[in-house]
């Protein structure tokens, strides 16, 4: 199974980047990070639409066939790490070839992007910096692989 993280914004070097690299090096699944960015200083709904265009274009280029799309969204469903790992196993068992995680911009998603997602997931009710969310997602992917293989990394 291939994992793709499609994120708005460019990750710069720093502690979040180091954490992403650490967890991706440990993760048994191939993980590709695709970054899209609207560089013009747009505001509000105009920015949402433009970022939505970029995300949808990238999704089209990746290919939605045999893919499961999870949009990280503060209004999505929260779940424990064990449930997250079970969701990944279910997709693997169903023959899904790609799980695509979406991380939107600071203003969220255009409605068209949410409509493309199979599932909306939240890390918590709190708001997190987008670059930190990448590191958290990579850690959770590694943790899920440990849970699925019985590795003692996860304590429950």
Image (cartoon, rainbow, N blue to C red):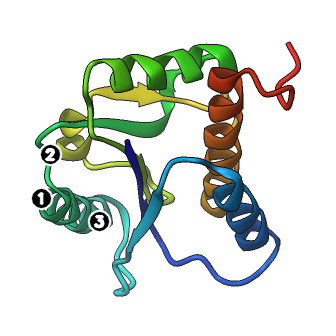
The image position of residue 103, as x and y in percent, is 46, 52
| Residue at position x 37%, y 70% in the image | 43
Q: Are marks 1 and 2 in contact (CB under 8 Å)?
A: yes
Q: Secondary structure at mark 2?
A: loop
Q: Residues within 10 Å of mark 3 (few under 14, many from 20)?
A: many
Question: Closer to the camera: disc 3 or disc 1?
Answer: 1
Q: Mark 3 — residue? A: 51
Q: Which quadrant is home to the N terminus?
A: top left
The image position of residue 3, as x and y in percent, is 42, 49
The image position of residue 124, as x and y in percent, is 67, 28
Q: Are marks 3 and 2 in contact (CB under 8 Å)?
A: no
| Residue at position x 51%, y 48% in the image | 29
Measure the C-alpha gap from mark 3 to mark 1.
14 Å
Q: On the image, which quarter does residue 83 sit in? A: top right
Q: Residues within 10 Å of mark 1 (few under 14, many from 20)?
A: few
**Placement of 67 over or under 11, stated as above or below:** above
Q: Mark 1 — residue? A: 60
Q: Is residue 64 left or right of residue 118?
A: left
Of mark 3 and mark 1, the one earlier in the sequence is 3
Q: Are marks 3 and 1 in contact (CB under 8 Å)?
A: no
**Placement of 131 over or under 64, stated as above or below:** below
């Amino acid at each position: 199974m291939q994992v793709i993280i499609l994120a708005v914004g460019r990750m710069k070097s720093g502690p979040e980047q180091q954490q992403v690299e650490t967890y991706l090096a440990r993760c048994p699944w191939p993980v590709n990070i695709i970054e899209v960015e609207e560089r013009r200083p747009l505001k509000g709904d105009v920015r949402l639409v433009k970022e939505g265009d970029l995300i949808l274009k990238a999704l089209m280029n990746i290919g939605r066939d045999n893919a499961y799309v999870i949009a990280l969204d503060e209004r999505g469903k929260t779940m424990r790490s064990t449930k997250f790992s079970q969701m990944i196993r279910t997709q693997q068992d169903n023959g899904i070839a790609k799980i695509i995680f979406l991380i939107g911009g600071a203003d969220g998603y255009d409605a068209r992007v949410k409509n493309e997602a199979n599932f909306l997931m939240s890390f918590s009710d709190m708001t997190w910096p987008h670059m930190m969310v990448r590191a958290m997602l990579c850690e959770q992917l590694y943790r899920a692989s440990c849970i699925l293989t019985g590795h003692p990394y996860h304590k429950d």
